[in-house]
Amino acid sequence: MGNTTGFSRPSRALFALILVAVATPIAASECPDLDSISFDSTAHAFTQERTLKSLPNPLISKGILQIREDSFVWQVCAPFDIRTVIDATGVSQSIEGGPATSPGAGAVQDAIQKINIADIFRGRFDRLANAFTLSSPTDRVRGEPWRVTLTPQPGAIATVIAGIDVSGCQAIDQVAISYRDGGQDQIMVGAAVPEATNAQCPAE
Amino acid sequence: MTHRAGHSWPHMIALLALVLVPVLFGMRLAATGVSVDSDIQSILPETSASAAEVAAIQQASAAVAARIVIGVRGGSPEQDQAGAERLHRAMMATGLFVPSSADMAETTAWVHANRFDLACERDLNRMDAKWGDALAAKARGLIFSGMVPLSGVKLGKDPFLLQLGLLECLAPGAGPASANAVVSGRIVGSPYELNTQNAIKTVLNEWQAAPANHGLSLLRSGAVFFALEAGAQAKREITMVGGISIVLILLLYTLAFRHPVTAGIALLTVFAGALGGAWLCFVVFGTVHFSVFVFGSALTGVSADYAVHSLAARRSTPNSRPPGLRRALTISMLTSASGFAALLFFGIDLFRQIGVFSIGGLLFAWLFALTALPVLDRKRNAPTGKTRLTAPIAAIFRSKAIALGAIAGAMAVTFWGAMHVSFVDDLRQFQTLSPPLTAERTALFGKSGAQFSTNFLLSSGKTLEEALLQEEALIATSDAGAERFLAFSAYAPSEARRAATRTAYEAHLLAPHVEAMRAALGLPHTDLKTAPSDAPLPSWLSALRFERGGMTYLIAPILEPPILGQSSSFNPPEGERVISPPQKYGAALQIYRKQAFTVIGLAAAAAALFLMLVYRSTRAAWLIAPSVIGCAVALCLPGLLGVPVTLFSVLALFIVLGAGIDFSVFQWEMKHDETGWTGTAVLIAALSSCVAMGMLGFSETLPVQTFGITIAVGVLCSMAFSFLAPLAAPKTG
């Protein structure tokens, strides 16, 4: 009677060997080096946890972000519908379905553009070199998730932001912005939402 | 044998006076220091603008013209920033600099305390439900979009981020293109104060010389830098003109008197006069404007003639006291002084000071020429006896036909020139803005960068509330747009507007939206107080308000459009309440110019009257004719060359008048001199005046240029016609 329970002991050992042999290159290709990461233009869910010193609890926002070469859409779906678009023409914001206008005053737009959140999510760290000093752990094992710290260069932004930590694997998974006054923004990129072709909030 | 002056009592007293004046002056300097007013704004006469407007211009200058922005460039961002921080520390050490960050901290506290009384919307009628909804939505966008850093905001007290929006919308958009490696702030006091300018200049020079800053450069913006650059250009010109003048004058005196020390004697005569004039001015006025030294010394420069005539007369009669010299010097001095005395009757303090300085200057120079000069003049290598240096000129004028022809020619030039004369009183045409500084400003602010002009809106009222209401109404109806004004009332509105604004916030923002916003932010319910809390008025804001004569005045500087440094092209909105300091200064200079014309006429009349009294003959008035012809030609001839007439041209006429009187009086008094030395002295005096002051005509600065050209033309013309004096003057001397 043949062995119905599966592979024989030698066969299992051989299979395990093959799995290890195959799996190693797969693991190495999961997290490319920092200069090789790319962004996925498919919309992704995100969660933002904003800790402000003047509030007792963090503010939690959920929404969809979509990164493209020529635009960056940041669509907050809850607790309010706020759509922010950064493209070649600048920054525009539509609140609760209202018309797209410049968010806040000039200083606010200036701050958004200086932080350059779109290129952070694109992983285009070379474009951030004018405003930030980049550093990453030297002991990272090749293929494992990576982490990079952006420290603002002296100037106006440095008086507000202490540093930005970006981590991920194939793309950006998490961005943490630390403010000088102790506040923090923690952004976690979630699963792809391919049905949100234009980064629209799902219908309730 | 060398003639030595006799040691009579009057002589000794005069010498004592010459010694005592520097001693007394030195004692005053050591004890209290001299009080020199170096602020250009002090020249504004209260006749051209009300006292309040003059005060407002000074206040506005402190508020706007005192602002400076310096960018550090040329290194890496870190190097630039480090350089900017070193510069910031050096500027702070002067005690003359208030950084923008200090102003910003004060402003933030003030705006937060008054946030429910302030609004970006200037039209109260538009602060309705829609406005409140938009404010609430905008706040939700800023807080929950997650894109905006919200460092330092107090959401518990300001859940709609009013402070953030107000800080941005209330301040007109003036600032550098990049805030990186920039030192910005304001200078305490006036940027036109020479002491302030020198302190800033020292800081910049030391910063540039420091090894740590090598490779870095500065981009400067601010009135103080333009003033410094203008001063540096003047210094360069004075150095060049002064250097050439000294060489030429030394040459002239050496040629005539065969020894360069004679030029030193002439210079000492003028110096003694200027020292005496300055001393008298301080005794009479206490505080003296720095420009009085410039013009007072220039008028006292006429006294170089006394030295020249003394030197010449002593050479014409080498073995005895020159006959008639003392009388000629005295009449000449008293005639010029009586002419300059007309300045004392001017309604403007500046001119009275120049009058006292120049009269004192002539008196002390005269004393010097009579007493000290004979002691100093050893007549080494002196050519004595006859000289025929000016014989050709005398021969020409001996012919009546030629003399009449010359007069007719002068009249023709005068009339022809008069047809082409133009007047310039606008300060902005006096000197073009420094191209390097304009380029630095453009680099710093970008091509679209806007800055405050020196123009401002002036509002007033018997109370602060009245003044605020007027400012609010004027700005609301201005075509320029409210966002163009840095208005006191925007930050500290009238009580009426405060109450209406607070009501609008309560009705259209807080009532419909505050509970929902609190819930979204996770804040407990508490009453939100809308009444303003205590906060000190920012110091820069209080500088926009002043009181005078029981009235409260408010200044609202106006933002000029981006015009790449050409501030002159800014046309302020129509309305008599808009004050343009350049226009006010222009109006002041125009008044000065017109009054100076009147005074020069009065001075000539006073001098003629004095001569008629001295000589007891109406014909003596003709001794003024060479000066009058010189003045007329000097005023009109430049018109043919396209050179306009400025106040400084008219001031130069006083020198022409004084010098011309000297020439005529000496020609007349020494008419029996057959040695030719009198004519030679007149020629040397005229040429040295032309060299010393006429060379200023090569200056690139219009006032200096017109001053120099007028003197050169006027003095030469007066000199030539003074050879007619012996023909026209009284028969008896």
Image (cartoon, coloured by chain):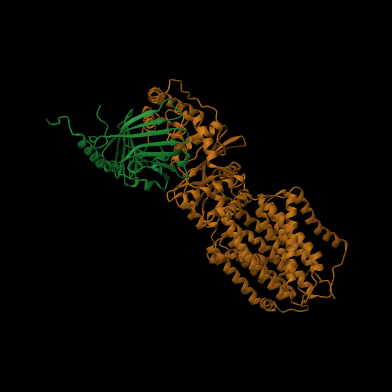
- Relative vertical location of residue B117 with respect to residue B303 in this rendering, above or below: above
Tell me the quadrant of the picture where the N terminus of chain B can be found: bottom right
Q: In front: B629, or B53?
A: B53
Left or right relative to A13: residue B581? right
| Residue B244 visible in the snapshot | yes
Within the image, what quadrant is residue B482 found in? top left
Residue B371 horizontal/vertical position (percent): 81, 64
| Residue B65 visible in the snapshot | no
Q: In front: B583, or A87?
A: A87
Residue B638 horizontal/vertical position (percent): 56, 65
Among the chains pictured, the one given green colouring is A
Tell me the quadrant of the picture where the C terminus of chain B can be found: bottom right
- Relative vertical location of residue B295 with respect to residue B489 in this rendering, above or below: below
Among the chains pictured, the one given orange colouring is B
Left or right relative to B316: residue A87? left
- Relative vertical location of residue A45 with respect to residue B608 in this rendering, above or below: above
Left or right relative to B192: residue A87? left
